[in-house]
Image (cartoon, rainbow, N blue to C red):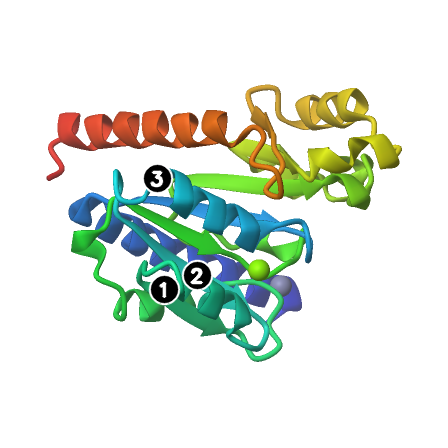
Amino acid sequence: MPKIAVVQDILSANDEIARENRRRFDQAGVFVLNLMSAPGAGKTSLVLRTIAALQPELRLGVVEGDVASQVDAERVAETGVPVVQINTGGGCHLEAHALRAALEKIPLEDLDLLLIENVGNLICPAAFPLGEHLQVVIASLPEGDDKPLKYPALFAQADAVVINKIDLAPYMDFDREAFRRRVEGLNPRVTFFEISCRTGEGLAAWADWLRRRRAEQRESVRRIGGC
Ligand code: MG
Ligand code: ZN
């Protein structure tokens, strides 16, 4: 088989399992986020801040994707929320089948919100939907404001872009207006957040948005005759 056909098969198999995962999420009534970023942008910090903001009002669970180690999962487990680690063993992104296996170890029916922390990578997670309701891309000031130019696919399909580490603004040349314009050029309907997981700035707006989007999703599942 030509190489391109093989790649197409892998992607369509992933999409099929992603749709299965989505059905399970909707049946269980859990709202699911796929958090993606380059390494070190603050995915785990945002997970921890989101737990602090919303637990126990919403019942959270977390899936941690990493190439190796459980250090992020251990930090999350200290909060008391259920967490499952996926180690990709070198793989640079999560795939829907790996998530499906991880879901066996998490009490989906007991959750309102599931946060999936993808492997730190701005390239291939864009091509592997997992069944999530929303895709969130986290950028941070030290990475520079040109990331949307270099990795357009992920920014083009994100539901939200979170700019983290804004407490470093005085020390960085990151042009937030230019960054936003570049993202909006790819994705005019995206929602932006500017936050600092270190100081807590901007996190209330993020938590409010999650509450609202979750409620909207529940309402739409109810209307179309889901659970
Ligand atoms: Mg992490
Ligand atoms: Zn990859």
Query: How far apart, in angstroms, are the residues tagged by discs 2 and 3?
Result: 14 Å
Chain-order first, disc 2 or disc 1: 2
Ligand 1 is within 8 Å of the C-beta of the residue at disc 3? no
Q: In the rendered structure, which amino acid carries the disc numbered 3?
A: Leu
The reply to whether dot 1 and dot 3 touch (C-beta < 8 Å) is no
Residue under label 2, please give it.
76
Query: How far apart, in angstroms, are the residues tagged by discs 2 and 1?
Result: 7 Å
Chain-order first, disc 2 or disc 3: 3
Ligand 1 is within 8 Å of the C-beta of the residue at disc 2? no
- Residue 183 tag number: none
Question: Which image quadrant is residue 141 in?
Answer: top right
Query: How far apart, in angstroms, are the residues tagged by discs 1 and 3?
Result: 16 Å
Q: Circle 2 — which element?
A: helix
**Left or right placement of residue 94 versus residue 53 in this view:** right
Chain-order first, disc 1 or disc 3: 3
Q: Of 111 and 217, which appears nearest the observer?
A: 111
Res 96 seen here: no
**Left or right placement of residue 107 versus residue 205 in this view:** left
Res 146 seen here: yes
Q: Which quarter holds ligand 2? A: bottom right
Q: Circle 3 — which element?
A: helix
Q: In the rendered structure, which amino acid carries the disc numbered 1?
A: Val
Residue under label 3, please give it.
54
Residue under label 1, please give it.
83
The reply to whether dot 2 and dot 1 touch (C-beta < 8 Å) is yes
